[in-house]
Image (cartoon, rainbow, N blue to C red):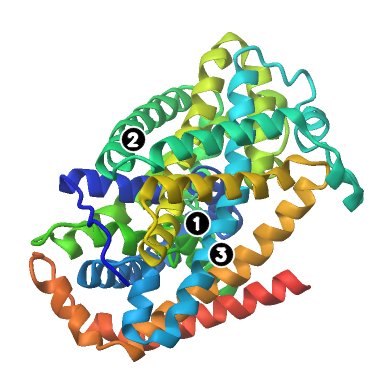
Amino acid sequence: MTETKKQEWNSNLAFMMAMIGSAVGLGNIWRFPNVLYSHGGGSFMIPYIVSLFLLGISFVLVEYAVGFKFKKSIARVMYSIKDKLEPVAWFILLVVFLITTYYVCVVGWDFIYIILSFTKAWGANPDLYFSNNVLHATDSMSGLFTIVPNVLISVFIIWFIAWMIIKRDLNDGIGKVSQILLPLLCLIVVGIVAFSLTLPGASIGYTQIFTPDWSALLNLDVWLAAFGQIVFSLSLGMAIAMTYASYLPEGSKLVDNAVIVAFSNSGFEVFNSIGIFSILGFMTATSGIPFNELVTEGTGLAFVVFPQVFNTMGSVAYILGPLFFICILFAGITSVIALLEGVCYSISEKFLIERKKTATVVCIVGFLISCIFATGAGSTILGIFDAYLNNFALLLAVLLECLIFGWIYKFDDLIETLNNNSKLQVGKTWKVTIKYILPICIAGLWIQGVYSTVS
Ligand code: PFF
C-alpha cells in the first residue's frame, strides 16, 4: 500500500465542532426524550450519567487513541494490528454505510417538512398526511415498484449536499460546515427552548424530566436503555472518532477533547428535551391529550405529533415549525458527513483513489440504495434495516473494537498516547473498563438487542 496525502485539521476548534456535529443528530433530538420518559424520567439520569462515563467517554478515548496513534483509516489500522483483522474494518464500514443510506432518507423526510411547515401544508390530520404523502406505505413488497417522488427528490438533495461537503478538502468541507451549522443549531435550540418555557402548560412537560421514578433503577432494561442511548448518541463504534482523531496534529489534548465532546453532546440532548417536553406539555394543556400519548419515538414525534402541536399554535407556528425542522436538518447533515468520512477515507486509502472521486462514487452508490426507501415498501425496509443494524450490527462493532484494541493490541501504548499532552490522565481504571467491564455490558446489550429484534 502506498501513502496518500495526509490531511490535518487546521485548528482544534474545527476538530471539536466536527466531533460534536457528528454526535449531535436525530438521536439527540427525537430519540433521547422518549428514552428518558419511558425509562424512569428524572431517575434515568443516573444510569445515563454512569453510561456516559463508563461507556461513552471510555470508548471515545479508545477511538481517539487508536486514530491519533496510527494516523490511518480504520481499514489500515486493523490491517496494521493483524492483517486478518482487516475484514472486521470493512464489516464495520459496511454497517456504517448502510446506516447512512436510511439516515439520509429520514433527513430527507425532514427536508420535506421544512417546506410544509411554512404553510402547515400537512393539513388538519398530520398523521394521515405522513402516511399518505411521505411513507406511501404498501402492505407488500410489491410497493418496491411504487416511487414516492417527493421523498426521492429530497433524498437526492441530501445526498447532493453531503457530496458537496465530503468531496472538498477536510477543512474546507467538514471543518467549515461544522463550524457554521453547529453554532446555528445551538442558537436555534436555545431560542426554541426559551420560547417553549413561556407556553401555557410547559411545566406539565418539563417537570417530567426532573420527576424521578426510583424503582426504575432496579430494572435492568433501564440500564440497557441508557447504554443504548449513549452508543447511538455518541455514534460509538462507527469509526467516526477514530477517523477524525487521525487528522489531529501532534500535541493535541485527546482526553480533554473527549470529555468536552461527550459532555457537549449529552448537554445538548438534555437541554433540547426541556424544549420538547415543554411543547408537549403545552399540547396536553390545550388539547387534553394525555402527555404519555404524545411522547412517541422518532419519526412519529417529529412528523406527526409536532405538526399536530403546530396546528394548535396559531401564527407563531409559522416561525417555530420551520426552525424546529431546520434544527433536525442541521443536526442530520453534520452526522451524515461524519458517517461518510470514515467510509471514504478507508476506500481512498486502500485503493489509492483521490478523495473527490471516492466521495462521488460512495455518494452515487449511497443514493441508489437510498432510492429503495423512497418506494412504497421503503418504510418497511427502513424499519428492518434500523432494527438489525442498530440492535445487532452496531453493537457487535463496538464489542469487536473493545476486544481488538483491549486484548489484541498493546493497550499500554494507547494509555501513553492519551496521557502525552492532556491535563486529564487515564490509567488502570480505564484499562479495566475497556478490557473487562465494557465487553460484558455490551455483550448484555447485544443479547437483549438480538432478543428484541427476533421476538
Ligand atoms: N449520533 C448521531 C445521532 O444521534 O443521530 C448520528 C448517528 C447515530 C447516526 C446512530 C447513525 C446511527 F445509527
In the rendered structure, find residue 454 and report the number of the disc placed on it: none
Q: Is residue 181 left or right of residue 157?
A: left
Return the residue nearer the eye: 315 or 323: 323
- Label annotation for residue 177: 2
The residue under label 1 is 212
Task: Report how many numbered discs are placed on residues in the image.
Answer: 3
Q: Earlier in the sequence, mark 2 or mark 3?
A: 3
Q: Which residue is rendered at x = 72% and y = 69% of the image? A: 453
Under mark 2, the amino acid is: Val
- Which of marks 2 and 1 precedes in the sequence? 2
Secondary structure beneath dot 3 equals helix
Label 2 residue SS: helix
Q: Is residue 185 above or below residue 50?
A: above
Residue 37, percent across and down? 57, 52
**Amino acid type of the residue tagged 3 in the rendering:** Val
Query: Would you place residue 254 above or below residue 151 in this image?
Result: below
Circle 3 is placed at which residue position? Answer: 95
Give the alpha-carbon distance from disc 1 to disc 3, as whole Å. 36 Å
**Amino acid found under the numbered disc labelled 1:** Pro
Q: Sequence order check: which comes first, mark 1 or mark 3?
A: 3
Count neighbours of disc 2 (C-alpha within 10 A) and say few if under 14, some if 14 to 19, many if 20 or more.
many
Where residue 349 appears, as percent x and y from the top left, is 35, 63
